[in-house]
Amino acid sequence: MNPDATPHSDTPRELPDDGRLDLFSTGSSLLRWIAVVLVVVLVAEVAARTVTARSAEEVRWYDAAAQQRIELLDERGDAVEVAFAGTSAAWQAFVPAEFEGATGRSSINVGLAGAIPTVTGPWLADEVAPRSSPDLVVWGLTPLDFAPEYGDQQDEAYRSAVATADGWLAGLDRLVSSTSTLVASRRLLRSPSDLFGSGEEQRASELAAAAATTGPDGERVDFDENFGPEEIAIQRSRLSNYAIDQRDVDAIVAAISQLQANGSTVVLVEVPVPDRFVQQLPRPEDDMAATQAAIIEIGASTSSDVVLMGDVFGDTNFVDSIHLNAEAASTTTRWLAHILDAVQVDEFDGGCGFVDVADDIGFITAVGVCRNDASS
Amino acid sequence: MIFNSVTFVVFLAIVLPLHWLVPPSRRNLVLLAASYVFYGWWDWRFLGLIALSTVVDFIIGQRLAAAVGERRRKRLLAASLCFNLGVLGVFKYFDFFLDGAVDLVNAVGLDSSGPTLGILLPVGISFYTFQTISYTFDVYRRRIEPTDKILDFATYVAYFPQLVAGPIERAQRLLPRVQDQAGRAMPRGRQLDRALSLILSGLFKKVVLADGVAPFVNEVFADPGRFSSLAVAAAIVGFAVQLYGDFSGYTDIARGVSELFGIDLMVNFRQPYLSRSITEFWRRWHISLSDWLRDYVYIPFGGNRGSSWFVARNLMATMLLGGLWHGASWNFVIWGAIHGVALVVHRFARAGRTPSGPVRPSQLPGIATTFAVWCVSMVFFRAQSVDAAFDVFAALARPSSGDSAIASVFLVVVLFSATIWLDLVQRRSADRGGDTTPSHGATTSAASKATETHSTLRPALTAGVMLVAVVVFSGGSPVPFIYFQF
């Protein structure tokens, strides 16, 4: 407000020039202008490369573990025959070396923490399959995969990660990033703390933690016990209002369709969960049954075999309310190898039934199996 | 659709060539259609409101011109004001005043919960409503002739570069430019350079200065108690940088885009953070609003006439209304009150002297004091409530114990310095009469060539640095402009 105005000065002012900021020169000196701008950009690119060379690597994927798994996949290439996928429950449950020992098929575990189907689907179809073309994909599922109250943050994290963001602009960004450090590392460059301070330390520790909890074939090797009440409370909140979320079903079906088109066979495995976990469901028995029914239905609709191992272990075989201990993980993997073998050599008659598996002391367990894929 | 989005780039890439390809008589049709698409992108339901506002003021303008008796003219003006302020009142202030009435009823001991309608605020309503009011007012005062072409008037009201966040253009200035379709020239040479310069500087201000500092500001204002007093102070300064970068960045882009259509918009900011007094500040910050308030509120109240007490009253009333214009909340009322008091104090303390001419180092205390007053008012502007604002002040006054956030404080210092540097460059140019290029006294060809090289080098270097900065600070989801909410 201009309080110096007089009653006779109330017409819009033709203001003096606001002070030009000349930035362009599109006339006869356009080429010179472009040359200078290019030099500035080149100098900035060199500076960016110099500065970021001393900083910890930036996490461009869903998380640090996903980033390291991509490096592993790139390293292994087409040598991978079997890929295990799913949330951390599946990541911990399947031990590739165990599977390879039982079947002779080279394996890798690409499971990710919190990777519900809307994350695992595109992860398998767009990232894993193009890099390794596995013959077989084993997708481990638990009720968490279908829980409506769980996974939105993970979904957002996957879709906003630099490497997996949606849209043509994100694609262009990745394209330019592949040649320009200035573009690729701009998130670091604009934040001093991310480049040199606490952000860098946090990034370095995330990468170190991911490396420490990932085995040589990508499997999870975090067997620290955690039975605290907080852990149970977290599961309870994730499973509140439990029902089968159709978005997750659709994501699984869509991903299987893409994987099959790529030449992969998919087996859906209901991953073992402890009773401690089941009791956190609003209607424990009904909700477990609904989960099994959903997996069976997906298997039938996509011609994928289904293995139901949800209740094969007691609470003592877990390190917390969802993750298997090392011994149980090895047993699960061996049993899975046996079941898949049994199905393939036609010991299984088709439809849904049971396959007996034996543990180290000869105790027999019947595992539910649905045979839907006639080609396997 | 916001300026710093891909959607807008595509929109502009379609509309701009179309505007210049159609016959001159159809250019406003293209502009109006584009403006309605631009506005409808947010919420097509509010297109009816802007169209209604256009039709009502167009008709009243026509009737004002035809009316002979002063009484009838006053009635027509009152009808326009009732309609425009009524629309603004319902959509922007209804819930605020309803809440206030409920609080009052509760304060006298009666129990009332009162219904809150939760009315959606149409984007830019404060801007285009003030524009239509000024049109009717000026027709009433016989300062302008009403237009008899509704297409021209509708284009003036809805012109998309300035529709949602100004500048608030007067019909006296913008309408002739809109009407002169054939006279519009496709920008070339210096005019094109200027348009592109404005767009780049606007992008720099928005993407680098405003969006660069925003995450830290948001973090501190969300939980000021967690941070040290240094970090809180930096966040307050950071918000001053953010608001200026955001709003003047928007204005620069709006002006640059408008120049691509051959229409120049008014200057809305003139290096406000180099102001030597609060009075000077209000001549340099959001000029189109302060001029509007001066002409349609302050002067009708009596302006500078009368006793000191009356002038002070007029200043306070104008600034309180200016605060309320920003939003229906007590925070904005307090924000306006702070500026009203500051203007009154300055008016009586300066004894009629107003600093003018180039900025000198000896004037630094005045600049710092003005900026400090602005920063204090910024706390109320940014905080979600009055209590939240006092939480910020409490965290500022408390001995340092929280998170110092040194890296973020450093970022604020860098971006604040860049803001002041931009202002200094422009102020120096303005002091020289608007030319940042070297003097053109050289006569020999060698001297002329050296001058040309020099005149290319500095713009290109500055543009290169700005482009690099925009690249570094871009990449996230586009952040909406702050003033869109007003």
Image: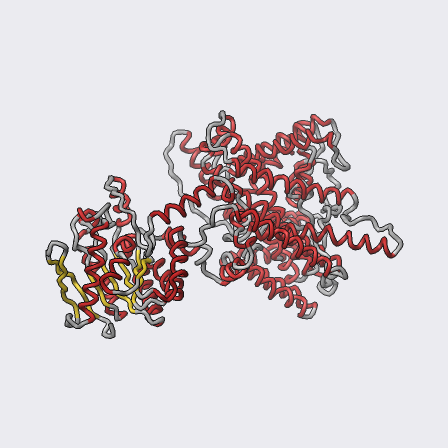
Choose between B426 and B183: the one closer to the eye.
Answer: B426
The answer to whether one can see residue B127 in this image is no
In the shown orientation, is residue B24 left or right of residue A342? right
Residue B315 x/y as whole percent? 64, 33
What colour-coding does the image apply?
A: secondary structure
Q: Check the image and report above or below for B323 versus B123.
A: above
Q: Residue A60's x, y, as percent?
A: 45, 53
Q: Which quadrant is home to the N terminus of chain B?
A: bottom right
Q: Quadrant of residue B336?
A: top right
> In the image, A197: left or right of A314?
right
Check the image and report above or below for A253 versus B263.
below
Q: Residue furthest bottom?
A: A375
Q: Residue at x 18, y 65 (%)?
A: A369
Find residue A252 and report its horizontal and vertical position in percent. 31, 63
Q: Splitting the image into 4 quarters, where does residue B175 fall? A: bottom right
* Along the viewing direction, whichever of B406 and B215 lies nearer the viewer: B406
Residue B13 seen in the figure: yes
